[in-house]
Amino acid sequence: MADAKNDGFDLTQFYQIFFEEAGENLEQMEQQLLQLDIETVDDEELNAIFRCAHSIKGGAATFGFEDVAELTHQMEGLLDKLRRHELKPTAPMVDVLLESSDALDALKGLLARHQGSGAAVPETASLVQRIRILASGTAPAPTPAPAPAAAPVAAPAPASFGGMPAASVAGVERSLLARIGPLSDTGLADPIRDLFRDIAGLGRITAERDEGGCRVYEIHTSSSDTDLLDLFAFHVAKDAIQLQASPGAAAPAPQSASRNTAPAAPDTPSDVPPSRPAATPPLLPPIPPAT
Amino acid sequence: MHSILAVDDSASMRKMVSFTLASAGFKVVEAVDGVDAFEKAEKQFFDLVLTDQNMPRLDGIGLTRKLREHPKFQATPILILTTESSDQMKQAGRAAGATGWLVKPFDPARLIEVIRKVIR
């Protein structure tokens, strides 16, 4: 981990700013967690809590405060899944996040007073473990229109993905359709094709067409819906992206990402990166049809 | 003297990066997020941009893309300095036009070394 005294750079002078900032972030995080209504939580609330944890983690990692960095890293992982709608907030999640926030406050206090060891140090290992279990989603993922069973591989029935269901687990090959639009110019979706060329292991596009002002890509991939949406959203507005199972899905209600439009991704396509080799084949061979 | 735009929503990180770079003889301007950074970049030229990834309003990759679309910054080195280390994030950063992806915690001397290599 980082040693704050490094090649003549004495970074301990920044500790105080970090502690003050971490204190503000912890206070904000605690208030927001206490106000959270798990039935009606909105994306911006979750994003704000995530950013608090992330900010503390960054500083802690840089200054070498390992216990703080590890605990905030775990909190961040859970909060990331919540804000991406991969998990639904539950009371135990809020509880462990609040307890972790208390532990961080105590740790910070000790560090600020140059006390780093002894019986008074809050123990964080059990908090880390509890967060890991909750973040692993062993409770069933909530899906409004669940696909039949949990069959993630080339489901024969045309099932549409509802939200971020368990069927979008990364690592399992599947075929899906990405419908991008409507767009004023379907060429605006070209950078999405480039992503598959430029990012090894993302998947491959097996066909594409333009229809009704939209660009439709047939994709074969082992990436999760979440990863695909996050990458696509760098190039087109998130509410212009719909993912659904293929082929030939009538798709009565294909689910697009439900996040608020954030200002992070302008709609104009990025520059095409120069001369990249063709995308490597997917890591897993296509699963042959059962005979 | 080369000037660097240092972008991070954390004040302690900004201060630390500024201190590190200033001690190496760079002029540093700070920005609190991608929107602030882009507004500053429109008003003055920078020889290098060093940005965090996760920030409110406009993140590091979003900022990189906006800068690459601007005639002044198409060839400027842009380094993303962040705790994120997933391969897909890094590749998305590259696809957006970032020059490099540095993972926190960083070694101040190493950061300066990297900057000296890429800055023109």
Image (cartoon, grey):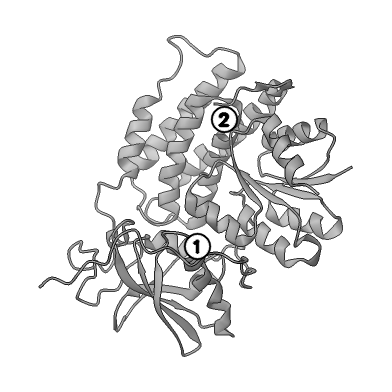
Q: Residue at x 48, y 48 (%)?
A: B86
Q: Is A152 left or right of A182, judged from the image as shown?
A: left
Q: Residue at x 46, y 26 (%)?
A: A103
Mark 1, residues whose alpha carbon is within 10 Å: few (<14), some, or many (≥20)?
some
The span from disc 2 to disc 1 (Cα, nearest Å) is 28 Å
Q: Which mark is residue A160?
A: none
Q: Which mark is residue A231?
A: 1
Q: On screen, B58 above or below A5?
A: below
Q: Earlier in the sequence, mark 2 or mark 1?
A: 2
Quadrant showing the N terminus of chain B: top right
**Chain identifier of the residue bearing label 1 in the image:** A
- What residue type is disc 1 on? Leu
Q: On screen, A237 above or below A9?
A: below
Q: Residue at x 54, y 35 (%)?
A: A57
Q: Secondary structure at mark 2?
A: helix
User: Residue A250 location, x and y as percent?
Assistant: 29, 84
